Amino acid sequence: SPRHLNRLANITMASSRPDDRGPEEFRPIFVDTRVLNQAKGSAYVELDNTKVMAGVFGPRQSERKFGFQESGRLQCDVKFTAFAAGSMSKQEQAAAERALSQAVCQALSPSVDLTKFPKAVVDVSIMVLEKG
């Protein structure tokens, strides 16, 4: 709506953001790849005070309990270290991990051609080392 665009324009024109960055400044980021030897692909990422390590493993043979499938499965797992979980209760941490795991799978699914991996699983594992 025009009202939304006007508000967006005001934010864009602001001289600085709450973290004192200008409207055209990016947050500092550090990325290192190939950090996990057993993974097909992996990365370590720092964005402000958030530190995350991710790895992609497989494809590997699917467990028999899933039976034959024409296409493979994408399995995503997000976990927090105790340090990153902070003051979250165990239940809150488990719920956050489930929700993030589901969101990662949903985001990555369109990019992975699972028809090339029948009866297989591709695992994406993400560890939140520190949460800023």
Image (cartoon, rainbow, N blue to C red):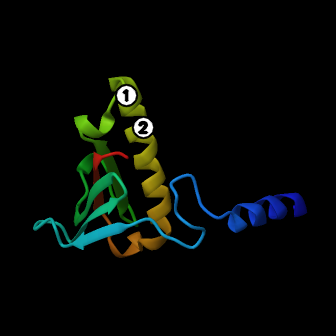
Mark 1 neighbour class, 10 Å CA radius: few under 14, some 14 to 19, many 20 or more: few
Picture coordinates of residue 1, whole percent (x, y)? 87, 61
Q: In the picture shown, does residue 119 fall above or below 18?
A: below
Q: Nearer the viewer, residue 8 or 79?
A: 8
- Label 2 vs label 1: CA separation? 9 Å
Single out the residue that lies furthest toward the right.
Answer: 2
Does residue 107 lie above or below 25 as drawn? Answer: above
Helix, strand or loop at label 1? It is: loop
Kindly check if marks 2 and 1 are in contact, taking CB atoms under 8 A apart as contact: yes
Residue at 38 percent across and 40 percent down: it is: 97
Residue 120, given in percent of the width and then of the height, sits at 28, 63
In the image, which disc is placed on residue 40? none
Image coords of residue 86 (percent x, y): 32, 32
Q: How many marks?
A: 2
Q: Nearer the viewer, mark 2 or mark 1?
A: 1
Please give left or right for residue 20 compared with residue 77 in the image. Answer: right
Q: Residues within 10 Å of mark 2 (few under 14, many from 20)?
A: some
Q: Which residue is mark 2?
A: 96
Q: Is tag 2's residue or tag 1's residue first in the polypeptide sequence?
A: 1
Q: Name the residue: 33% across, 58% down.
A: 68
SS at badge 2: helix
Tell me the kind of residue under disc 1: Met
Point out residue 37 in the picture as x, y percentages from the top left corner.
10, 68
Type of the residue with mark 2: Ala
Question: Which residue: 31% across, 60% down?
Answer: 46
Residue occupying the point 81% across, 64% down: 5
For label 1, the residue is: 88
Q: Quadrant of residue 35?
A: bottom left
